[in-house]
Amino acid sequence: MPSKVRWGVIGLGNVAKEWFLPALLKAENAELGALASRSPEKLSQFVEMFGLPVKTYSDYTHLLDDPEIDAVYIALPNALHKEWTIKAARRGKHVLCEKPLALKADDCREIIAACRASGVLLMEGFMYRYADRTRKAQELVLSGRLGEIRHIDSCFFSLASKARGNLVDPALGGGALHDLGCYPLNIVGLLANDKPVSISAEAVPFNGVDVVLSAVLKYSSGLLATIHCGWVNESRTLDTTIMGTEGTLIVPRTFRGEAGFLSLITPDGEREEIPVKETDMFLEEITQFSAAVLGRPALLNSLEESVQGVEVMEEILKKAGIRP
C-alpha cells in the first residue's frame, strides 16, 4: 500500500494559494501531483511561487484522467462544485471539496450517491473543525459545564473589499451566506446536533446575492441560535458566544487556527481562561483525509451534516428574500 496520497488541485484561488497548498507541502502522508487552472498565467504563477516540478493542466478533465492522481481538492466557484465532484468521482478520484458542497440539498445527495457508487471518499472542506479551539469548545459543551445550551450567537464578517467577482456573482453561487455564513451555521449545527424547527432571516441584497445577512434558528430543545455574516468594512470579525444555564463560553476568532484562549464565564461572573494551541487547520484536514484514503483511522466531517447544512442555507435564503 502506498504511504502517500497524490493530490491534484483544481482551481487556483486565494484559498489554494494561501492555505491549502502550503499545508499540502508539509503533510507527511500526502504530496502534490498536479495543478489545474484555465488560466495559464495562474499556472505559471503557482509553479514559480512554490518552486515545484509539478504537472500542470489547463483542462480540469485532463487532470482527472491522470492515473497518478489519487485525490483532488476542488476549490472552484460554488456553482461548479457539483459538476466537477461528480466527474472526479466517476474517474475514481477521492474528493475534498471546498464548502459549500453544493447550492441545493438535492445536488448534495446526487454528489454523495455518485461518490458512493464509484467507491471514492468525499468530504466537504470545513477546515476549522480540526482546530484545537473547536475541539475544546465542543468538549466543554458536551461535558455539561455550561448546563443546557439556550443560545448561540456566531458571526463571520470579512473585508468589504472582497465583495466582488465570483463572491457576488449569483450565477457562480456567490453571496455572504455561501462564502462566510456557512461557518457560523456549521458550528451551530455541530453544537446543536439537530436541525432547526423554524428559521427567520433578513439580508441586504446586492447584484442578486446577500452581502449582509442575519438569521435566527430555533431548535426543539429550546435552543435559539443567531448567525450573522457579510462584508461591511475592512476588518474581520469571527466570534462565537455559547450561553447555557450554568455559564457562557466565548470563542474568539472561531474559524481560525492561531493560539489563544476561550473564556468560560460562570453565572456569578467568575472567568476562566482556557488556552488553545495553534493548529494548522488545513494540514490537519489534509492529513486526516489522506489517512482515510490510505485505509487508516481518520476523522472525517459527516456527509449527513453537509446535506443538512445546505438544506438550512436554502431555507435561510428563501426567508431572506434572496431566493424564490
Image (cartoon, rainbow, N blue to C red):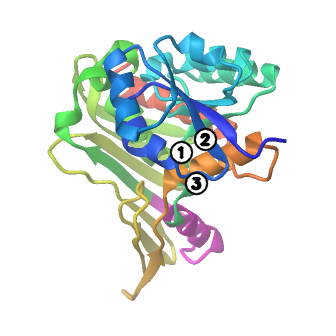
As drawn, 322 above or below 277: above
The tag earlier along the polypeptide, 3 or 2, is 2
The stretch of residues the image draws in magenta is 133-151
Q: Nearer the viewer, residue 270 or 294?
A: 294
Callout 2 crowding tier (Cα within 10 Å): few <14, some 14–19, many ≥20:
some
Contact between marks 3 and 2 (CB within 8 A): the answer is no
Q: Amino acid at mark 2?
A: Glu
> Tag 2's secondary structure?
strand
Disc number for residue 31: 2
Q: Note whether residue 75 is visible.
A: yes
Q: Cα distance, mark 3 to mark 2?
A: 14 Å
Q: Amino acid at mark 3?
A: Glu
Q: Residue at x 44, y 58 (%)?
A: 152
Q: Quadrant of the C terminus?
A: top left
Q: Amino acid at mark 1?
A: Leu
> Tag 3's secondary structure?
helix
Please name the residue that numbered disc 1 is placed on.
24
As drawn, 40 above or below 31: above
The tag earlier along the polypeptide, 3 or 1, is 1
Q: Quadrant of the N terminus?
A: top right
Q: Nearer the viewer, residue 157 or 58?
A: 58
Disc number for residue 284: 3
